[in-house]
C-alpha cells in the first residue's frame, strides 16, 4: 500500500507541477462531480495542489480550503510511514482518540454538503467560489 | 527513558508513554496494568487514517468515508482494550482504502482511454 501510495503521489506531483488541472484536460475530473454534478469534499484538490506547488496559497485556499488545512498532517503521516518502512525509524506517533477521527469525518462530510449550497456564504466553499465576483 | 514505539522522552520509571500510550515496562513482572489504563497499551494496530483521508480527498469517492469510520473504530477499540476488534476494524479500513483507490484508478484509466479514443477519432476525421 505504501509503495502504491508513493508511486501515485510522486507521479501526481510531477504532473501537477507541469500541468494545471484547471486547463490541461490531462487529469481525470472528479468522478462525483462528473456523474452527479455535485461537488465532493475533494473537488478542486488537484487544482489546489497545482497552485500550492507554484506558491499561490490564496488560489489554493479558494479552490479547496480543506485540502490546504489537511495537507501538513497528511504529509507528516506519509513521512512517518515512509521513514518507518525504509529506515525502520519512528517519528512521534500521536494517538488520536476515536472521537477526533469521527469529528474529522463529520467535518469532511459537512464540508462536502456545505459547498453545494448555492447561498452566501456557503458558495465560498465551492471550488474557486471565493474568487467569483 | 525513550519510548520504544514513538521515541518520545518520558520520565524514568513511567509505566506508559505519555505520547502514544505504549507500555514502557519491558519485564513481565512489572507489566501489570495500572487501573484505568487501556489494556491495549503497547499493541500497535494500524488504522490507515492517512490513506483513508487521501483516498477520500484525492480519489473523490464516497467509499473513503467507511475507511475513515473504520479508522476511528480501530482507535476506539484500542482505547477500550478490544485488540481483536481493533484488528478486524483495521482490516476493514485497509479494504475500503483499496476499494477507493481501485475505483479512483479505474475511473482515471477509463477517462484516459476515452480521451485517447477521442483524440484518435478527431485525428482520423
Image (cartoon, coloured by chain):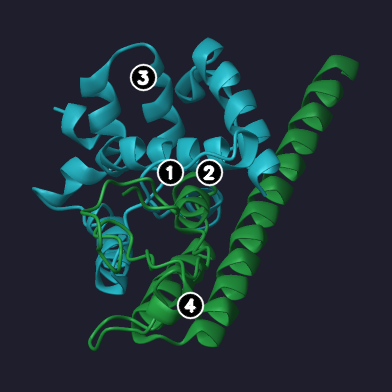
- Residue A88 versus residue A53: which sits nearer the camera? A88
Q: Chain for mark 4?
A: B
Q: Is residue B54 left or right of residue A111?
A: right
Position of residue B2 relative to residue B41, above or below, is above
Q: Is residue A8 above or below residue B75?
A: above
- Chain at tag 2: A
Q: Secondary structure at mark 4?
A: helix
Residue B76 placed where, x, y %?
36, 79
Q: Which circle, 4 or 2, is nearer the viewer?
A: 4
* Badge 2 vs badge 1, beta-carbon distance below 8 Å: yes
- Comparing labels 4 and 3, the label whose residue is closer to the camera: 4
Labelled pair 3, 1 in contact (Cβ < 8 Å) = no
Q: Position of residue A12 (x, y in %)?
A: 59, 27
Residue where numbered disc 4 is placed:
B28
Q: Which residue is mark 2?
A: A81
Q: Which chain comes out green in the rendered image?
A: B
**What residue is shown with label 1?**
A77
Tags 1 and 4 both on a single chain: no
Label whose residue precedes the other's in the sequence (2 or 3)? 3
Q: Are marks 1 and 4 in contact (CB under 8 Å)?
A: no
Give me the disc on residue A51: 3
Q: Secondary structure at mark 3?
A: helix
- Disc 3 to disc 1, C-alpha distance: 22 Å
Q: Nearer the viewer, residue A131 or B76?
A: B76
Colour cyan, chain? A
Q: Taking the image as drawn, is residue A132 in sight? A: no
Closer to the chain start, of discs 3 and 1, is: 3
Q: Chain of mark 1?
A: A
SS assignment at label 1: helix
The answer to whether B116 appears left or right of A126 in the picture is right
Amino acid at each position: 500500500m505504501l509503495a502504491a501510495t508513493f508511486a501515485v503521489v510522486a507521479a501526481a506531483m510531477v504532473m501537477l507541477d507541469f500541468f494545471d488541472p484547471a486547463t490541461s484536460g490531462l487529469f481525470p475530473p472528479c468522478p462525483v462531480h462528473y456523474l452527479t454534478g455535485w461537488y465532493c469534499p475533494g473537488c478542486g484538490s488537484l487544482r489546489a495542489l497545482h497552485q500550492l506547488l507554484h506558491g499561490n496559497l490564496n488560489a489554493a485556499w479558494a479552490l479547496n480550503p480543506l485540502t490546504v488545512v489537511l495537507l501538513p498532517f497528511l504529509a507528516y503521516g506519509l513521512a512517518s510511514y515512509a521513514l518507518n518502512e525504509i529506515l525502520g525509524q519512528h517519528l512521534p506517533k500521536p494517538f488520536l482518540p476515536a472521537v477526533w477521527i469521527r469529528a474529522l469525518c463529520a467535518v469532511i462530510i459537512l464540508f462536502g454538503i456545505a459547498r453545494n449550497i448555492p447561498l452566501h456564504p456557503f458558495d465560498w466553499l465551492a471550488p474557486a467560489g471565493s474568487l467569483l465576483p | 527513558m525513550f519510548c520504544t514505539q514513538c521515541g518520545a522522552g518520558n520520565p524514568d520509571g513511567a509505566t506508559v508513554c505519555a505520547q502514544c500510550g505504549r507500555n514502557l515496562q519491558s519485564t513481565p513482572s512489572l507489566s501489570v496494568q495500572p487501573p484505568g489504563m487501556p489494556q491495549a497499551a503497547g499493541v500497535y494496530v494500524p488504522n490507515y487514517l492517512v490513506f483513508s483521508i487521501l483516498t477520500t480527498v484525492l480519489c473523490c469517492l464516497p467509499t473513503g468515508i467507511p475507511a475513515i469510520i473504520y479508522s476511528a473504530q480501530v482507535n476506539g477499540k484500542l482505547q477500550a482494550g478490544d485488540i481483536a476488534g481493533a484488528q478486524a476494524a483495521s482490516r476493514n479500513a485497509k479494504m475500503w482504502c483499496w476499494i477507493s483507490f481501485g475505483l479512483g484508478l479505474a475511473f482515471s484509466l477509463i477517462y484516459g482511454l476515452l480521451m485517447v479514443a477521442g483524440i484518435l477519432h478527431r485525428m482520423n476525421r
